[in-house]
Image: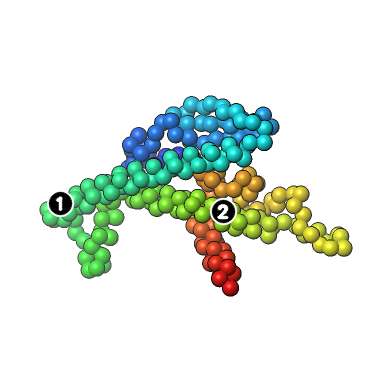
Amino acid sequence: MQNYIEMSQGRTGSHYVDEKKVTDKNWILNYKINREQHFAEITKWNGRTNKVYFRRGKDKDMQEKLDRIQKEQFDKMVEAIEKCVKVSVGENVIINLGLLGAGVITLPASLSVGGFFASFTLFNWPLRSVKLKRDLHLIGWIIDNKKDVDSVIHRDVDSKRKIDLSQLTPYIDYSVYPDDAPYSEEMYNNGINLNNITELSAKQLQKLKKKTISFQERKNNCEGD
C-alpha cells in the first residue's frame, strides 16, 4: 500500500491530513514476493523492512494474506481520514462564516444566488483532503470489486495480443506480453491490489471502474436470462 497521503500533498508540502493520526507505523507500506527463494520482503510505514519465508508453492497464499492485511489497514486509514476531513471542513466553514459576518469576504453575484457553499472553495476549503477522500473511496471500490476488475484487465490486455494466422486454425499468442498493454504484466498475472494500484492514475482508475460496472451489468443480464 503506497503512501497515498504523501502523494496528495503535492509540491507545496501542505499537510491537510496528519499522517500520524490516520496511519500506524507498523502497517505494510508495500511488499515484494520472491517466488524463487520463497519469501516476501515487507516494508513498513516506518521504513523498516523484513523478510517472511513461506513453503514452496505457497506464494499465492502469502500474497492473498498480505493483500487481506493491507485491505484491513486501508479501511482503517480511510475511516480515520474521513474523521479528519470532517473536522477540517467544519473548522473552515466556521472560519469563512466568521469572515462573511465581518464583511471580509465579498461574494461574486454568480455565487451569492444558489451557490453559497461554492464560495468556500475559494478560500480555506481543504481541497486536497476532500480529493484524497474521494480518491481513497475510488481505490476501495476497485479493491472490493477485485474479481470483476481483474476480468476487465485480462480482457483489455488480451485484446492487444497478436493473433497467429500462420496455422490452419488462428490462435491468440500468449507467449509475448503486448508492449501496448494498458496494465503491467505483474498486475495482469497477480491481479490488482493495494501493492500495485498506484501504477494507475486516478483518471485511469475511474475509467477502469466504469468498464467494470459495464462488465458487471452485462454479466448480471446474462445470468438473468
> Depth check: 78 or 218 in front?
218
On residue 98, the disc is: 1
> Depth check: 18 or 23 in front?
23
Q: Secondary structure at mark 2?
A: helix
Residue drawn 48% across the image and 36% down it: 29
Specify whether 126 is left or right of 32.
left
Q: Which colouring convention does the figure follow?
A: rainbow
- Mark 2 and mark 1: span between their CA atoms? 49 Å
Residue drawn 70% across the image and 52% down it: 178
Specify whether 206 is left or right of 18.
right
Residue position for label 2: 147
Residue 54's place in the image compared with 102, above or below, is above
Q: Which circle, 2 or 1, is nearer the viewer?
A: 2
Going by the picture, which residue comes out furthest to the bottom? 225
Residue 74's place in the image compared with 112, above or below, is above
Residue drawn 47% across the image and 43% down it: 71
Instruction: Where is residue 96? Give x, y as percent.
Output: 20, 52
Instruction: Where is residue 198? Give x, y as percent.
Output: 52, 45
Residue 16's place in the image compared with 146, above or below, is above
In the image, what residue type sits under mark 2? Answer: Lys
Residue drawn 56% across the image and 41% down it: 64
In the image, what residue type sits under mark 1? Answer: Gly
Instruction: Where is residue 213? Give x, y as percent.
Output: 52, 63
* The image quarter in which residue 106 lies: bottom left
